[in-house]
Amino acid sequence: MGVRKFTERKLVVASHNQGKVREIGDLLRPFGLEVVSAGDLNLDEPEETETTFVGNAKLKALAAATASGLPALADDSGLAVTALNGDPGLYSARWAGPERDFNLAMEKVEKALQEKSATSAQDRHAQFVCALCLAWPDQHTECFEGRVDGTLIWPPRGDKGFGYDPMFVMKGHDITFGEMAPAKKHEISHRAVAFNQLVDACFQE
């Protein structure tokens, strides 16, 4: 039983986060798919009750595929800070509060790091993690995970990304994801790593 190939022409991005929908839409553009978001279809957001990024991505993708009758792609991603024992991790969006205020979330991360006296680059190590899950209405799923390492800076810089991007400098780079041109970020980010695995497995002949 090999990996299932994606042959449909329409796909639901199982997210209400416009930044994430836009980024995944950009990655999918070369495949000529019609992409709609869960928000466009007024689909409910399922409660994220799993304990891993892959588990939550699978839960969201299956919920959207079942509700829409279309294949769905879900992402569960977050910032895992080494000095904070992997927090905010699965709860990265929740740290932003009900208003999804990521300036507030970044301040919380910085405050927590200062409380740990985390000053060196090593102390401020973090990973961005992205799990992608593609689900079909018959409940079949294919899941992939990507990670990139980096250092957290303060104050945040740049307004091109979303979420925690303005405080994350990827290893080997000197600008934040928030300062990076979207096309460049799409080539190297945690989402790109997971997406390339997905494409190689499910979209390539």
Image (spheres, grey):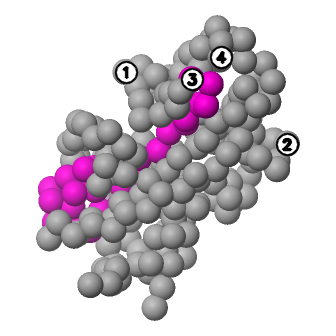
Q: Residues within 10 Å of mark 1 (few under 14, many from 20)?
A: few
Q: Is residue 130 highlighted in magenta?
A: no
Query: Which of label 2 and label 1 is nearer to you?
Result: 2
Q: Amino acid at mark 2?
A: Asp
Q: Is residue 149 left or right of residue 175?
A: left
Dot 3 or dot 1: first in sequence order is: 3
Query: Which of label 1 and label 4 is nearer to you?
Result: 4
Write the start and end of the magenta stretch as one range.
59-84
Query: Which of label 3 and label 1 is nearer to you?
Result: 3
Dot 2 or dot 4: first in sequence order is: 4
Numbered mark located on residue 174 in the image:
2
Q: Is residue 80 left or right of residue 135?
A: right
- Circle 4 sits on which residue? 113
Q: CA distance from mark 3 to mark 2?
A: 23 Å
Q: Is residue 62 above or below residue 2?
A: above
Q: Position of residue 192 (x, y in %)?
A: 58, 60
- Circle 1 sits on which residue? 98
Q: Is residue 82 highlighted in magenta?
A: yes
Dot 1 or dot 4: first in sequence order is: 1
Query: Tags 3 and 4 in contact by the CB under 8 Å rule?
Result: yes
Q: CA distance from mark 1 to mark 4?
A: 23 Å
**Which SS class for mark 4?**
helix
Residue 36 picture quarter: bottom left
Query: Tags 1 and 4 in contact by the CB under 8 Å rule?
Result: no
Residue 65 picture quarter: bottom left
Foreground of the two, 127 or 167: 127
**Which SS class for mark 1?**
loop
Q: Amino acid at mark 1?
A: Pro
Query: Which of label 2 and label 4 is nearer to you?
Result: 4
- Circle 3 sits on which residue? 84
